[in-house]
Every structure is written in C-alpha cells, then in structure tokens.
Amino acid sequence: MDLSSLLHQLTLPPSSSSSSSSSPPEKPRPPQLPPPITEVLARLQEKLIGAEDEKASDVLIGQAEQLFRTADPDWLFRPDPANQAALVAVASALIGRAALPLCEPDAPPPASGYRDVPERARPVCSALAALLVRLGRCQSEAGGGASRSLLHAVAPPCFVFAVTHLQVAPWTSPASRQAAAGLQGALLRAGRWRDPAHFLMGDEEEEEGTSRGMLGGVLDVLQPQLNKDTWQHSEAVKFVFSSTLLQVSRPALSPHLPRLLPPALLLSDHYRPENCMLGVRCVHHIVLNTLVLSCLLDLLLVLEKPPASLAPARPPRKPCRHDDVLRLLLTHMEAESKVALRRVYAAALPLYIDRMGVAVCRHLRRVERVLLGYLEVGDPPDETSRLAALTALQRTVEAAWPRMAGRVCVLLRCLLRLLLDVSSDCEPTAAARQQLMEQSRVCVALLDRCAHTQLQSLLQQVDSSCVSPDVLSCLATVTVETPR
C-alpha cells in the first residue's frame, strides 16, 4: 500500500458529520498536497481507540507503522505544538492497544487474563520503534531541533511500555520480550543514550550536544498509577517503578525524591511479602543515593544533646557524634568536584555550624580551608555554592568570634577578591551578584568587629581607581559603621 492510499484511508471523508447537509460539497484537495498531519494523526488516534476487534486493530497498527516509515519527515514532524501533542496521543493510543487488564486490589487477574497481551504488544513495539528510528535519523540532519523535541515528548511513554514488556511475567512471552528489547534499543539509539541509566539521568552538565535525562517525563507517565488508590490496579507498575528507580543514582535522584519516596514507602508498607521486600529495596536504594544531611541532624538530636546547647560552665566539651559528622562533611566538601554535590554540601554546612555553636572552634582550621575553597570557585548563574559558603562564614564568625582575630587577614583578602570578581563577572545574574556583594559586606563587617574596628582604616585606603563604584559603595557601608 502506497502512502497516498494510506492517507485516503486515514483522513476524514470530504463531508464530515459536523457539516450541514445544505453546505456545498468541499472541493477535493490537489492530489500532490497531503492533508494536514494533525488531521491524519487525529483520525488515526480515533480509529485506534475505537477499534472493536483484534483484526481491525492489527490493520491500524500496521498503517501507523507504514506512516512512520514512509511519510515525508518535514510533513510528519512539522515543528508545531499541536503536531507534537497529536504524535504523543497516537503513541498513547498504540500503547493502549496492548494495555494490561486492570485488576482488583490484592486480586491479580489469572494468567489467562494476560493470554492475548504478548501478541498485541509485538506489533505495537514494531510501530513505535519505526517512529523512534525516523526521529533519530531526523536528529542527525541539520536543524533537527524539532525532531529532538518530539523525541523527548514520546520517549517517556515508549520507555515505560518497553520496560513493562521486558519483564519475565505472565503478560509477556519470549517473542514479546524480544520485541520490547528492540523498542528499547531503538529508543536509546534515537536519543544517543548509552543505556537506560543514561536515558533516565542524562549528562550531569546539560550543554550543546549532551543528553537530557528523561526521569521526570517517565515519572509523569507513571504518577497516575502510583498513588495509594491506584497502584494495586496494575501488576506491572510496581516492577516498572522499581526497575526505573534502581537505575538512577545520585545526584540525579535527589531532585525527584518527593515523587520517588512515597511509592517506595507504599510498597514497603504492604502486607504481601514480595511487595514489602521490593519496597524495602527501593527505600534502601533511595537512602544510599540521596544526600540526607538535614535528616542526620534530626537523628543526632535523638542520640545526644547538641553541642550548642551545653552550658559554658561545663568544661571540657568532649567531642561527640556531631563532631564526627561535621568532620566527615568537611572531608567530602574538600574532595568534591561535581557542581550539584558541592551545592548540596554547601547548603548543609550552615545548619551544622549552627548546631555546633562555639564547639565549631574545634574544626576552625578545616572550616576555614573549605570556605576559602568554595568562595574562590564561581557557580554561575545563581552562585548557589558561594552564597551558602558566605552564610556558613557568617555563622562561623558569630559562633567562634573569640578565635577569629588571627584569621581576619586571610578571610578579608578572600572577601575582597570575591567582591572584585563579582563586580567584573557577567555570568552571575543581577540578583545573585547583589546577594553576593551584600553577604560579603556583612562578613567584612563581622570580621571588623572581631578585629575591634581595626579593619576600617585599612578599607579606607583602598585605591578607588582599581575597583568599581559598586565595590567602593559596599566597603563604604562598613567603614561608616561603628559597632561595639
């Protein structure tokens, strides 16, 4: 069947039901101009949803595959939001032709209920693979941005469908699992993902030519089936969820924690041992791959009193578990080079310094070394790490001020360098630049108090020809203060 015959079968008839009988007949389109792709896809979706028997369904799935293989890509993948939505709708309709039967909670269907699913899944896998192969080829050509956007839209439901039918389960057969493996392979090749883990997490730094992680889109597909009222209606969803989760590691897992933890807890709390064990495995993986630094603070409160709450009249303050955790945190901060983890560590440090109070004096040398390192390295555009490091420095100076006099010079040089860098750097946002300068000013003012205002005379000697007006204005607010 050629494309023109296929389009003739899929497009709406010349006189649709919405036209009145008195309207003149619509003029036929020129044979060389295909109808709008959105119209073709809408008709295909309608027929797929309404197919009443397997024979009609198989014919429609075959027509969809032929359309994906032979249609002009400029027409099929037209860069238009309506076209993208229509393609996703057709992919969903194809997947719906091989959907698993719903089951009652705690009463999965008998194996006979899945008898026809493997045979229905095979042609659907073939049709979806044809779509993905075509999208992958278009991405390689010049100006493939539109096809890349379409691929990112259809990839999550295709991935969920492939994983569903890769399971050794009553709803699969060796042939359907082979077809699902082919679909997954076509998906990975289309987006140049190395493996399913790379598909879910993407590259750490999203730049030109790098791959974007699809975990968020996959969770969008799974979410309606993962709440406490729906997860037991599908035998496959728990396996798809756990298989997806166990391939995601830190730091990609942390941003999705609010969506990943509730389903894992639902499974772990179920009375059926197999569900409970699966949930425990998921929770364990989350704990191992999530930075739970703030949770550790809550746990430490159960084990011991915080050092900051101990009365000063009770010497000596012996090292405790809080010291151990802070020491470990500082060790990881010094060695960490990944931007995402540096941001998380830097955000947690002020909380630990608050908890330690004056006992942070035991760690001043390492805290100073870590903060200097974090303040010297930019983190544009929002400068999250630097801002958190400045907050930690403020808390340290406030908590350990009797010990800061000997460190004022080193810290002041670092802060002045930071002010100069920020004033001439165009990468940070305007809001981040303003925050950096304000927090640096606060730190300089605190150090001046520790030095008994001896810094003011030094700051007044700054050569105005070497710094920007913004830096001079920032320093001027310190030199006019006379705190006691």
Image (cartoon, grey):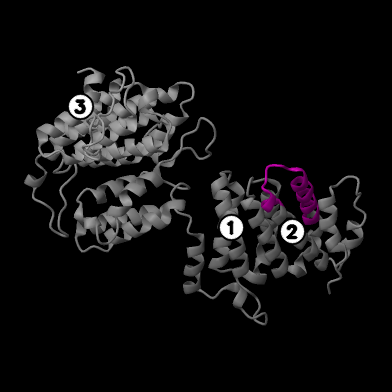
Q: Residue at x 66, y 78 (%)?
A: 315
Residue at mark 1: 347
Q: Are marks 1 and 3 in contact (CB under 8 Å)?
A: no
Q: Which mark is residue 8?
A: none
Residue 95 or residue 484, whichever sits in front: 95
Left or right: 123, with 199 as reference point: left
What residue type is disc 2 on?
Glu
Query: Which span of residues is magenta-colored?
Result: 411-433
- Residue 473 at x, y = what percent? 84, 56
Q: Report crowding for label 2: few under 14, some 14 to 19, many 20 or more residues within 10 A (C-alpha).
A: some
Residue at mark 2: 438
Q: Residue at x 67, y 48 (%)?
A: 429
Q: Element at badge 3?
A: helix
Q: CA distance from mark 1 to mark 3?
A: 60 Å
Q: CA distance from mark 2 to mark 3?
A: 68 Å
Q: Which mark is residue 9?
A: 3
Left or right: 303, with 310 as reference point: left
Q: Element at badge 1?
A: helix
| Residue 418 part of the magenta segment | yes
Q: Quadrant of residue 275?
A: bottom left
In the displayed structure, 407 sits above or below 176; it is below
Q: Please say whether residue 167 is visible from this viewpoint.
A: no
Q: CA distance from mark 1 to mark 2?
A: 18 Å
Q: Residue furthest front?
A: 22
Task: Tell me the quarter of the image containing the N terminus.
Answer: top left
